[in-house]
Amino acid sequence: MSPAATRPAMAHDDFAADWDATRIELARCEARLQTVPAPADRDPGQVATAAEAHRAARHARAAFLRKHARRVYDDLTAGLTTRPRASELALTAGDRFPGLVPSRRQLAEEAERHQAGKEGREIDQGLFFHALLADRVAGEHLIESMRHPTAAALALLDRLRETGQVRLTAAQLECREGVAHLTITNAHCLNAEDNQHVEDLETLVDLALLNPDVQVGVLRGGVVDSPRYAGRRVFSAGINLKELRRGRISFVDFLLTRELGYIAKMLRGLGGEDGPVLRQKPWIGVVDTFAIGGGAQILLACDHVVAEDDAYLSLPAAEEGIVPGLANLRLTRHLGARPARRVILGGRRIHVRDPEAALLIDDVVDPGALDDAVKAAAGRLAGPAVVANRHMLIAAEEPVEAFRTYLAEFSLQQAHRLYGGDVLARLDAAWRG
């Protein structure tokens, strides 16, 4: 039976009736899934049965959310009066609308599996956030909610005031002379990004923005453990592909939260009820050795980039099979359409001495001169009119509407890409290699 044939009929503007019909269809599809073994143990016929059940369920979810995403979001936020973060929103939706998104139990089961052995329920989260972000009211409310300081940052604020520093698992912060120095300390994996990295970076970015004594933020990679780069700093190796293969890179807590969380806060500042007060600060990115993938994406949110003279940038996401965050939105305005395609689609690596690197990097210096270059840049960016002018630049370059509509489509495409056969095959081949 085709998905169209099983799609529940939608009543005219009747939320309760539409949800009842959708809930019944979702339960039917889930019951069909339960007739086959776990994904890793399925034969070809069982794979086809599961795929058809998922197709039918996703058609039902999409049809319901196209009509009622705003109503669902109103229910989950008490009529826009509360501000749950994306992770809380997804879990609460699973409780209140069973089957619309994965339940807590289903997510716990998925967390125990390698990426290739999962049911792919995060695709359903992608459908959910695609619909919410595509709705202007719900999407803008969610974006603003995610810009509020995290509870973890607020709990650490007194420690920062007392000591001037905070050390977490994957990053650390030290505030001195009006500058917040954030250092990525995922040394065991070339400062690659994982769930913990995203959580810790957001906490520290919040603290830097909340600290009234800080005028400028600096983000730099720390010294790594790799024998190949012994004693050297590395900015970032991008997404941790080993963790992705193991199934430990979360769609919501990593891929969605990094864009709506710390990177959005670096670019747009903190949200809140402060009226005309701009709770944002300029950021300097410092590139030692290389900035690959997600590392290069972060630099596109920085106001000034300093790099050592043998460093390089790359965005190999197309080679890996995934979407490189918001690089597809931001790189074009830096490089232009054709060069951006060469980088994103063709895997072009940009060395800091290449001509086009000047469009991405402001200062190229000898490794020994990096600290002085950062200090000089921080002095220039500490001017009283900098915050207002960067605010207006961002408003012109990337309005919230453009950010929202991109994220809506990103949610859908990236969730599917996480479970693409080519992605899973590459991860497995890299692991065996």
Image (cartoon, helix red, strand yellow):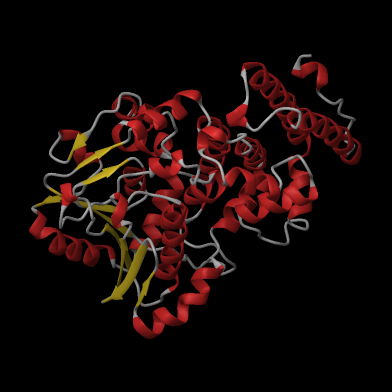
In percent of width and height, residue 417 lies at 51, 30
Q: Is residue 375 left or right of residue 59?
A: left
* Residue 103: percent from left, percent from top: 71, 46
- Compared with 177, 65 (above or below) is above
Position of 340 with respect to 396 (left or right) is left
Residue 263: x %, y % from top left: 43, 52
Numbered marks: total: 0
In depth, the one of 154 and 336 nearer the eye is 154
Q: Specify whether residue 89 is in view.
A: yes
| Looking at the image, residue 19 lies above or below residue 199 | above
Residue under the point 41% across and 32% down: 427
Going by the picture, which residue comes out furthest to the bottom?
Answer: 162
Q: The N terminus lies in which quarter of the figure?
A: top right
Residue 422 lies in quadrant: top left
Of all residues, the one furthest to the top in this rendering is 1
**Residue in view at x 66 percent, y 23 percent:** 51
Decide if residue 363 is in sight here. no
